[in-house]
Image (spheres, rainbow, N blue to C red):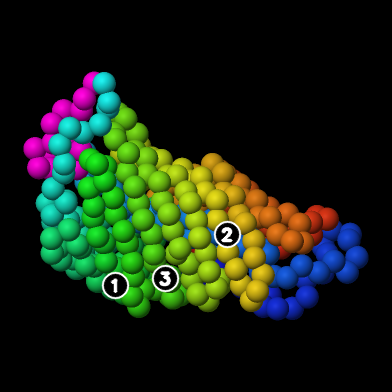
Amino acid sequence: MKKMKWALGFLSLLATAGCSDAYYDPYYYDSAYYDPYYGAYDAAWSYAWVDPVYGYWYYSIGGVLAQSIASGQPQAPVDVNAAAAQLATNASSTFTPAGCATATASGATVNYTFNNCSAQVALQQLSGNVQLVLADNQGQLGITATSSNLTINGAPYTLSMQIAGTPPNGNQRQVTITSNSYSPDRFDTRSSQSTVTWVTGSGCFTLDSQSTSTRNGLSSTSNVSGYQRCANQCPSAGSVTTQTSEGTFSSSFNGSNNIEVTGPGGDTRSYTLDC
């Protein structure tokens, strides 16, 4: 996140909209700014890992039978080892430039090593190691992802998430994500539940999430609604609302690379988006 702007460190924030001496810890503004980033990272990892194998998982692996008309669920277990092998094979096309990523599969586990890679839709300058463990959850795709020595955009990043797939619905894809991923430079902890949807092969996704985070003994809860982003573009829609003990902080996205986070009483801080 080398282009992200730190919200004035721990200097006092004075009202900029006519309010007198209002002070809100920079963390509250930062949480409304950074949480959508981390949610977008979660969504982008999911897109990179799920989109290439979604149809393969539900229709090809291990002789999965046609879906039951009554239940809509696959009628046979999937072969997680074959799915892992497929993800490892896809690494050279999923992450760019060519040769920046190596991946090996061992059973249901995939180990990645990244060297300044990018991936659709919101992942840039990936370096370090990521491990995936695939699971067959009663016919549904499950992925657990963790990292070591990972950086994104030059900043340390802790990746810890679980992805749960749902059966195909035409070209529509959907996953649910439980994530504790965050940058330790920005937050002390983060916990998120989100739903991500996209059209296969589109290079775009929509994110809805609720997250809690902490820093230096302070806490906040952020809700991201209707966040939409496509490859090589800034977020085109959506909003974030962060609830804190000091009040509500909020912002919205309209395709610009600048946003304003508005705090209680109309106080605002401006940020540049790295997109």
User: Which secondary structure lies at badge 2?
Assistant: strand
Q: Which residues are magenta?
A: 56-69
> Can residue 192 be seen in the rendering of this structure?
yes
Residue furthest to the left in view is 63
Residue 274 numbered mark, or none: none
The residue under label 3 is 158
The kind of residue tagged 2 is: Thr
Is residue 116 at all visible to an observer of this figure?
no
Tell me the residue that label 2 is attached to.
Answer: 212
Residue at coordinates 26% horizontally, 46% vertically from top-left?
Answer: 137
Q: Nearer the viewer, residue 146 or 155?
A: 146
Please tell me which of labels 3 and 2 falls first in the chain: 3
Q: CA distance from mark 3 to mark 2?
A: 16 Å
> Would residue 273 be found to the left or right of residue 118 on screen?
right
Q: Residue at x 50, y 60 (%)?
A: 191
- Marker disc for residue 129: 1
| Rendered location of residue 190, percent (x, y) | 52, 64
Q: In front of the other: label 3 or label 2? A: 2
* Label 1 crowd (10 A; few <14 / some 14-19 / many >=20): many
The answer to whether residue 79 is left or right of residue 113 is left
